[in-house]
Image (cartoon, coloured by chain):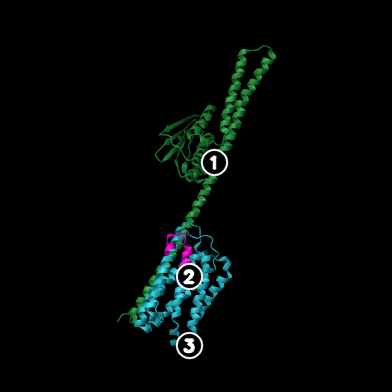
Chain colours: A green, B cyan
Amino acid sequence: MPFAGEEAKLTILLGTAIILLFGIAVVALLTIFQKKSQLNQKEKEILKETYEKTILQAQLEIQEQTFSVISGEIHDNVGQILSLAKVQINIMQESNDLNKAMLDHVKDNIGKAMTDLRDIAKGLNSERIRLVSLHRVVEEELNRINNTGAFTTRLCFEGTERPIENNKKLILFRIIQECIQNCIKHAHASEMQVSFVYQANFLNVCIMDNGRGFEVSGLLSDSAGLGLQNIKRRAWLAGGETLIASRLNEGTSITISIPYE
Amino acid sequence: MKYIYYALLLSGLAITIIRWRRLDRSLRLFAPLYIAILVTQAIYDKQATPDEMRKVVFVYHINQAVGTTLLFSYYYLLLAKNRLGKLIWVALALYLVYFTAYFIRFPAVFLKFDPIDFVVEGAFITLFSLYYLIELYRSQEQVRFFSYPHFWFAAGNLIFYSGASFFMGFALTLSKSNKALYTQLMPIAEVLNLMLYSIYIKGLLCPSPEKRPN
């Protein structure tokens, strides 16, 4: 007889329990998945916020660096040239006769000062990094260092140049600047080289010097290596990776790989 | 158990009325639903003898039609912008037409306990609830499930209607062949009802919803 006795009771109880459990499981799973998804979303938002802060920070630091360079340039170059021009004009004024050669010299000096000022004005434009290619800005930076006579700098290329997203460009430029500053301040190097390798999906930038080097693992783990950790963190925020290699008395190389988009 | 049942229904109705202004249109549909269930239950419980009770069983079928219309409308309002939204009206029309015809054709069924209309309604509500919950999950809106009223209503409906439809489907057959076992298992349906109305109350006490999935 159908539906009689313990067997029927068990079938109904078990069936209902299974269906109920199925319903509960669906609700529980959706809740768990939703919580995970919300957590991921939150992490993404935090990452985005940190990225934006990094961009802002990089902009401020680039600006600060630019101001410092400009102040040096005005004091050391333009100021000196104009002082010389003033002295030459004073000499001509006192001697009462017009020295054509000296006048030409004054003219040249003023022209040079104007060119320098024009270059400084270019550097002051905050949009410049966005408008000019990255290696061009780095080239100017290296030329400036080269002109001091304390270092020999070199810029290398490989592959076809490809545009890189503006915010990433800004961060990457700031990283390169920081690496160059490290070379100048701490490495006791005489040569430095920046190479750009344009790969299919990544741009590899390598900053090398022939300085005194350091113990990578040791420096990354203590507070003295904060700058290097900062470089790594910034590259990571821009979706890239950093490889730091160094040997005592043989130099250092920092390679940053960053995707174009 | 009966008193707990009444207490839950009355509490639900009271909360709906008190929070009327804070509830969205779809949640307000639960006020007439509570009233319909309370009236039906009161009519049934007012009968002194089992014979008298049998005479008013048809009220359950009427309540069933009212309840189905309100619940389908609730899901329509939730899923109005969705592809399934329009199909809900079609399903409701089919349901009402089919069971009207069915009860006209078999009037005896209308006058006795036969949960066939409940089983069919349960299948639809299970489907709508499951669909709504998945849509809510996929909607990418930052809705906290536990403080979102429609989550509780849909989750409660999914659990209750899937379990109760299955149980009542068997109960229908069982009531014909083994009355004793049927009576013995009936508390399962009662417990499921208590669970559903408790979950509804939890949903009604949640903050008013601001967002809903398309």
**Please, is residue B80 above or below residue A72 in the view?**
below
Residue A99 placement, left or right of A258? right
**Please, is residue A252 above or below residue B105 in the view?**
above
**Please, is residue B176 above or below residue A105 in the view?**
below
Q: Amino acid at mark 2?
A: Leu
C-alpha separation, residue under disc 3 versus residue under disc 1:
84 Å
Label 2's element?
helix
Across and down, in percent, residue A227 comes to: 52, 42
For disc 1, the neighbor class at 10 Å (few under 14, some 14 to 19, many from 20) is: many
The subunit letter for the residue under badge 1 reads A
Do dots 3 and 1 share one subunit? no
- Give yes or no for contact between labels 2 and 1 (Cβ–Cβ under 8 Å): no
- Give yes or no for contact between labels 2 and 3 (Cβ–Cβ under 8 Å): no
Across and down, in percent, residue A181 comes to: 53, 36
Q: Amino acid at mark 3?
A: Ala
Q: Nearer the viewer, mark 3 or mark 1?
A: 3
Q: Amino acid at mark 1?
A: Ala
Q: Residue at x 63, y 21 (%)?
A: A84
Q: Nearer the viewer, mark 2 or mark 3?
A: 2
Q: Quadrant of residue A97?
A: top right
Q: Which residues are magenta?
A: B68-87
Is residue A247 or residue B192 the one in the foreground? B192
The subunit letter for the residue under badge 2 reads B
For mark 3, what is the residue? B48
For mark 2, what is the residue? B70
Query: Which badge, 2 or 3, comes first in the chain's sequence?
Result: 3
For mark 1, what is the residue? A58
